[in-house]
């Protein structure tokens, strides 16, 4: 009989993950100003969530999404500046032992390898600690830059999903990427 992992406990025991340049940690209301800095920017939020109009809206988002159910959701803090520059999360499907990766990064930090660094740490946690079988992510077909990030972190393109969802009133085609634990481990050795 297989012993089921207690994912909530494992996430609770690992609310901080660290890389060379980054601290992945819980998002709190103290992060409103930093998060609003990128949440108010249409280019940063175009493919992710509705652009925030006020800091109050950002505070509500933090309280309702990050604080109401914080496990698996991390703020990306740059160690050097101690500022929140984005978020990354791993949403686990316990029945299938899979995880969906999602992220957003302040455009001021694009092109610096921040998301690959954060994602690799979170994927390592997902495969090594949570013992997931597979990690996957989606991106809007009109956002190929996100697909390149997914390739950099070792995800493989798996398919195109027409009319996958509606984002900001528009029907979106998603591109799906994923990797199994077995493939990821062979690429990391």
Image (cartoon, rainbow, N blue to C red):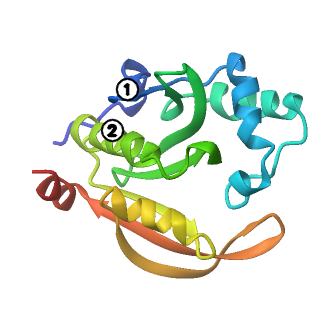
Q: Which quadrant holds residue 35?
A: top right
User: Which numbered disc, 2 or 1, marks the residue that appears first in the sequence?
Assistant: 1
- Which residue is depicted at the point 54% across and 48% down? 103
31 left or right of 92? Answer: right
- Secondary structure under the numbered disc 1 in the rendered image: strand
**Whole-percent x and y of residue 138?**
51, 64
Q: Which residue is mark 2?
A: 121
Q: Which quadrant holds residue 10?
A: top left
Q: Nearer the viewer, residue 38 or 1?
A: 38
Label 1 crowd (10 A; few <14 / some 14-19 / many >=20): some
**Whole-percent x and y of residue 184?**
21, 56
61 left or right of 184? Answer: right
**Whole-percent x and y of residue 14?**
37, 23
Q: Is there CB contact under 8 Å for labels 2 and 1?
A: yes
Which numbered marker is on residue 33? Answer: none
97 left or right of 111? Answer: left
- Which residue is depicted at the point 50% across and 81% down? 160
Q: Which quadrant holds residue 83?
A: top right
Q: How many marks?
A: 2
**Up-down relation of residue 180 to residue 120 (above or below):** below
Q: Which residue is mark 1?
A: 17
**Up-down relation of residue 163 to residue 101 (above or below):** below
| Quadrant assignment for the N terminus | top left
Between marks 2 and 1, how big is the CA–CA gap? Answer: 7 Å
């Amino acid at each position: 009989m297989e012993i089921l992992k207690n994912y909530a406990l494992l996430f609770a025991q690992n609310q901080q993950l660290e890389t060379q340049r980054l601290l992945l940690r819980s998002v709190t209301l103290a992060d409103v100003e930093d998060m609003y800095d990128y949440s108010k920017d249409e280019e940063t939020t175009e493919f992710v969530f509705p652009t925030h109009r006020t800091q109050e809206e950002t505070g509500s988002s933090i309280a309702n999404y990050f604080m109401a159910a914080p496990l698996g959701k991390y703020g990306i803090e740059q160690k050097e500046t101690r500022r929140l520059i984005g978020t990354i999360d791993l949403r686990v499907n316990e029945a299938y032992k899979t995880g969906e990766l999602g992220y957003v990064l302040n455009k001021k930090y694009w092109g610096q390898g921040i998301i690959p660094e954060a994602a690799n740490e979170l994927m390592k946690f997902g495969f090594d600690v949570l013992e997931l079988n597979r990690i996957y992510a989606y991106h809007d077909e009109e956002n190929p830059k996100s697909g390149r990030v997914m390739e950099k972190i070792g995800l493989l393109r798996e398919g195109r999903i027409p009319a996958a969802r509606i984002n900001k009133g528009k029907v979106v085609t998603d591109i799906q990427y994923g990797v199994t634990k077995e493939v990821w481990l062979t690429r990391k050795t």
